[in-house]
Image (spheres, grey):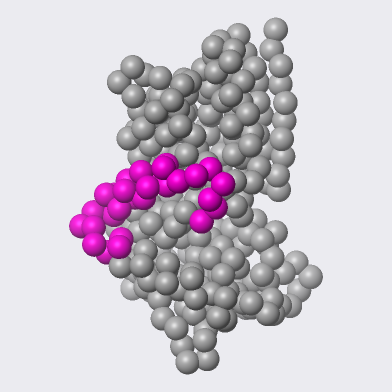
Amino acid sequence: MSESQTYAYDQLKIDLNVEKNSYVVRFLGKSFLKDPSEFVLPILWKALQEAIVAGKRIVIDFRDLAYMNSSTLTPVIKILERVRVGRGEITIEYRKSMKWQDISFSALVIFQTPDRRIEIIGVD
Amino acid sequence: MNNEGVEMDRFECGTEAATPMSGSLELCVDSDWAQMGRVNEDIYRFLVSCKLSEELAARYTMVACELTENGIKYGNPDKSPGGVHVRIRLEGGEIYLEVSSAVGDESKPFLVELDRTIQWARGFQDPFEAYIARLRAISHEPLDIDRSGLGLVRITYEGRAALDFYLEEDRTLSVSAVSQLNN
């Protein structure tokens, strides 16, 4: 059984699917968020807390995101650091063949942990 | 000013060449965040029409949009219609992107931060190192702090552009990014 929820803000859509072993948060469209703490942060934070309680990994999938401003990345960075020093398991997936995604997201490898609790994965 | 908040003053691009060509675009944007989608589309379309690859068009659209967002956030305090000016010029294998807007006393903290961030980023030999340092700094900030300064550093790293700014006597702030198209 899986649950799903969709959030929309301007041209950005976020799909949240609770699957057997993970919470999958999928970003679609274009993101022009004005403030980092609006919209994205509450969704990611709530999903992370629920995933931790359920003993599941959270997967943040950016592959279908066509554009994002820097305010969209900021909450992701903060959440990665909270997981790195605390609890939880998180995977970031991006599209390696999209140059801007490769450049932006591959840098997040600095948050990757040796035990793979945090994984940054470029998918072709 | 049209009803949609973005006025396209000039949209010029030659059509005879197969390689990136010269051309210029000027947009007058309202201080309305809802315009960013339209600004993004207009700039991307212009850059593709100038024969830039999709990769380069996406890269410089990001640069122009990050600059425009700052112009909307911190400039044009009177909210004059079309008060944020976006200029893009392609010439001689170089792209020049500039966003200008009036600034008031309330923009002082932004000007200080702008100067500090640009000087700080110039202190790194490789923009990637500046970007990583910025990511690390942001990661430790409280969740509810909104100002990150990541946009400017992203312009130097992902946009491979040199940043500069100047404040004119009439208190018009222009922030520019310049990049070689073969960079």
The image shows residue A75, relative to residue B23, as above or below, that is: above
| Residue at x-position 68% and y-position 80% | B78
Q: Position of residue A118 (x, y in %)?
A: 40, 24
Of B97 and A55, which appears nearest the observer? A55
Horizontally, is B81 left or right of A44 in the view?
A: right
Picture coordinates of residue A62, whole percent (x, y): 53, 34
**Percent of width and height locating residue A71:** 53, 50
Q: In the figure, is residue B30 to the left or right of B178?
A: right
Q: Which residue appears farthest toward the left when viewing the image?
A: B125
Compare residues B102 and A15 and report the one nearer the observer: B102
Query: Is residue B132 on the magenta stretch?
Result: yes
In the drawing, does residue B119 fall left or right of residue A84? left
Count of numbered badges drawn on the protein: 0
Q: Position of residue A23 (x, y in %)?
A: 59, 20
Going by the image, does A97 lie left or right of A63? left
For the point 52% across and 84% down, the residue is: B172
| Residue at the far bottom in the pictured view | B169
Of the 4 image quadrants, the one containing the C terminus of chain B is bottom left
Q: Quadrant of residue B90?
A: bottom left
Please report the residue visible at 40 percent of the width from the left and 54 percent of the height from the top.
Answer: B154
Quadrant of the rendered image containing residue A104: top left
Q: Which residues are magenta?
A: B120-147
* Residue B88 appears in the rendering: no
Name the residue located 52 percent from the left edge and 91 percent from the top edge: B170
**Seen from this angle, which residue lies furthest right?**
B3
Q: Nearer the viewer, residue B47 or B127?
A: B127
**For residue B120, above or below residue B54:** below
Residue B149 counted in the magenta span? no
**Residue nearest the viewer, comparing A37 with B57:** A37
State whether residue B76 appears in this view: yes
Q: Quadrant of the N terminus of chain B?
A: bottom right
Does B67 appear above or below A121?
A: below
